[in-house]
Amino acid sequence: MTTSAPHPTYVILGSGGHTAEMCRLTQALLQQTDIEQTEKYQPIRLILANSDSTSERQFRQIMPQAAQSAEIAKVPRSRNVGQSWLSSIFTSLWALLWSCYLVWRDRPQLILCNGPGTCVPFFYAAYLWRLFGRLPSHSRIVFVESFCRVETLSLSGRLLLPLADLFVVHWPALATRYVDKKNVRYFGRIL
Amino acid sequence: MHLNTVYITVGTTQFDALISTASSEPALKALQKLKCTKLVIQHGNSQPLADDEIQLIRKNYGIQIEQYKFRPNIEDVKSADLIIGHAGAGTCMDILNNHKPGLIVINDTLMDNHQLELAKQLAAEDYLYYCKVTDLDAQLATLDFTALKPYETNPENLSKFVSAINQLMSH
């Protein structure tokens, strides 16, 4: 399997509200007036959980044009809502193997995600492959915390805080709490 | 206040209690008082209403019910006069961005119930109301949905986010 172009942007879609947020952010990134900036992020590759039946449609509805050229990869989920912690360990390992393979294969320059469990193994994979030189050293991982998180970080957020190059929070309480973390940024209400 | 079309949504979660409480007698009476004539229910992974219940509700309360599992819901959101939903970010954003009166119902059976944080914050800023599922019927009868504030987005902040990423990727 080969990719159409090197160094794509990975947009990791979760389910439900996560997807709605991610679509808005991706849209903002792809619809800048400065075309040169926009082109930097092409090609887009959407990462979806294989159990996710709605995100792709949602993305197509909001960004028909971007969806047309975007490639789509379906991956196993680390954890389903309500799944027990013990079985989460095995499904997470399987998801991690998948992520390592995809990231090794595609060498994404930017990974953009906002907190669904699906994104966690991708961050580890990207961090690892960048360390080993498989990813370019200028590749970046960006985590946008869920809009839901007002006072505390999500599980994904806590796991990925040390790895993310940019970690965006939506509410002042979180910004104050993590004021000493250099990668944490608060831009006010962006959604 | 005329809330003809009420949209109930649970997103991708399982929230049987919301569907059953919203279709209980006191809740339907409250909805009837709010001049509701149509109830659109996105039940997702929750238990949908039975056909005979739907018939009965139409007969007793004059409320027509349309229910479905999943579909792109932009139209449902836009045509709603009131949105009742779980505290997922998607539902909150649908309420805020479409300037709809909204009532968020807290699901306390979820493993990690951070949802309360968002609903509380948004309710504190008068953008929507929130309540526990056990209080839903009482709240529907008493809340004043005209007192809510319309939500303003801030495109400048979004551009700051975009610039930060542009800068991160300028090598």
Image (cartoon, rainbow, N blue to C red):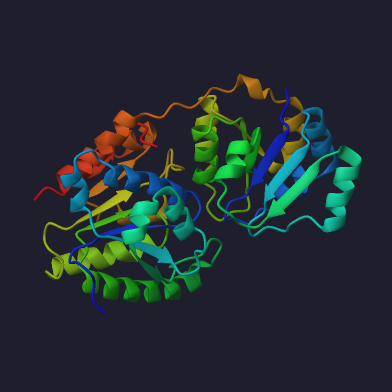
Q: Residue furthest bottom?
A: A1
Q: Is residue B105 visible?
A: no
Relative to B162, B171 lies left or right:
left
Q: How many marks on residues?
A: 0
- Name the residue located 49 percent from the left edge and 34 percent from the top edge: B97
Q: Please say if B23 is above or below A9.
A: above
- Along the viewing direction, whichever of B37 and A69 lies nearer the viewer: A69
Question: How far from the left and from the top, in percent, is residue A97?
Answer: 33, 76
Q: Residue furthest top?
A: B147
- Name the residue located 73 percent from the left edge and 49 percent from the top edge: B66
Question: How far from the left and from the top, in percent, is residue A130?
Answer: 16, 65
- Along the viewing direction, whichever of B41 and B127 lies nearer the viewer: B41
Question: How far from the left and from the top, in percent, is residue A156?
Answer: 38, 56
Q: Please say if A85 is above or below B60.
A: below
Quadrant hosting residue B87:
top right
- Along the viewing direction, whichever of B58 and A90 lies nearer the viewer: B58
Relative to A161, B36 lies left or right:
right
Q: Residue furthest left?
A: B171
Relative to B8, A8 lies left or right:
left
- Name the residue located 40 percent from the left edge and 53 percent from the top edge: A64
Quarter in which the C terminus of chain A is drawn: top left
Q: Please say if B44 is above or below B96.
A: below
Question: How far from the left and from the top, in percent, is residue A168?
Answer: 31, 43
Q: Please say if A90 is above or below A44.
A: below
Q: Is residue B133 visible?
A: yes
Quarter in which the N terminus of chain A is drawn: bottom left
